[in-house]
Structure formats: C-alpha cells, structure tokens
Image: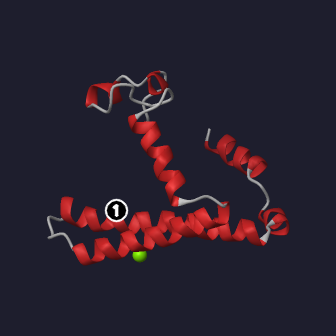
C-alpha cells in the first residue's frame, strides 16, 4: 500500500523543472501572494493556539500585525487578479445573506449550516 502510494505520487506529481520552465512573472506573483496568505494564516492560528491550548493571554498587538500581514497578501492577490476588495465583500455578502444563490436562504443559523444541501453528500473528513 505504501509503495503503491509512493509510486503513484512519483508518477503523478508534476516535474518541478517543468513548472519552473512554464512559470511566468504573473504566476510567480500569484504564488507569492497565496503562499503569504497561507503563512500569515498559520501565524494567526498560532497566536490563537497560545490562548486556547497554552492558556496564555491574547497578544492583540501580534494579532493586529498578523491581520495586517494577511491584508497585505490578500490585496496583492486581488491586484494580481484584477479584482477589488469590494467585489470580494459583495460576493461574500451575497453568498451568506442574500440572493437566489445564497448559501442560507433564511440567513445563517447553526441548523441551516448543518443542513446545507451542498455539504450533505460529503463524507466525514478523517
Ligand atoms: Mg506575520
């Protein structure tokens, strides 16, 4: 089983040299921004982990710093994609609060979230 998995990964993973050859400056910018979002989200998670798991006081100065870092990378990503923060906020409001394609037709509730049609068929995660 483990050898099968290793062989599958070796066969299917895209060659790094090929990725590098095909990489454009635009690709590199997008990758830089999404790696930044992920890294800063991890730093924010760590700040909250210290509170919840280690029972330390919340370092709000650090939280503000990490949220600012996230804003930096999200704005860079939006600029790279030619979209605006306003578009993203409007899409989020539409998804959560209104419109015929809204996720929650009658507004969010724990019950509505548990019964979401698009999540009903999902298998439980390991
Ligand atoms: Mg940071």
Local crowd at mark 1 within 10 Å, few (<14), some, or many (≥20)? few
On screen, residue 69 above or below 107:
below
Q: Nearer the viewer, residue 15 or 11?
A: 15
Residue at point 34%, 62% (across, down): 45
Q: How far across and down, in percent of the image, does residue 89 sit?
A: 46, 51
In which quarter of the view is residue 83 placed?
A: bottom right
Q: Could you say whether the residue bearing mark 1 is in a helix, strand or loop? A: helix
Mark 1 sits on what residue? Answer: 45
Residue 85 lies, with reference to residue 69, above or below; the image says above
Q: Where is residue 49 in the image (x, y as percent from the top left)?
A: 26, 62
Apparent side of residue 63 relative to residue 9 in the rendered image (left or right): left
Horizontal side of 22 relative to 43 (left or right) equals right
Quadrant containing the C terminus in the rendered view: top left
Residue depicted at 26% across the width and 63% down the height: 48
Residue 107 place in picture, x, y as percent: 32, 31
Ligand 1 picture quarter: bottom left
């Amino acid at each position: 089983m483990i050898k099968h998995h290793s062989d599958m990964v070796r066969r299917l993973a895209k060659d790094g040299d090929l990725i590098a050859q095909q990489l454009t400056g635009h690709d590199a910018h997008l990758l830089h921004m999404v790696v930044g979002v992920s890294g800063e989200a991890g730093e924010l998670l760590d700040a909250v982990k210290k509170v919840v798991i280690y029972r330390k006081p919340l370092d709000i100065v650090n939280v503000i710093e990490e949220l600012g870092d996230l804003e930096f990378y999200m704005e860079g990503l939006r600029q790279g994609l030619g979209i605006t923060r306003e578009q993203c906020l409007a899409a989020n409001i539409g998804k959560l609060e209104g419109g015929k394609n809204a996720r929650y037709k009658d507004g969010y509730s724990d019950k509505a979230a548990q019964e979401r049609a698009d999540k009903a068929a999902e298998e439980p995660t390991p």
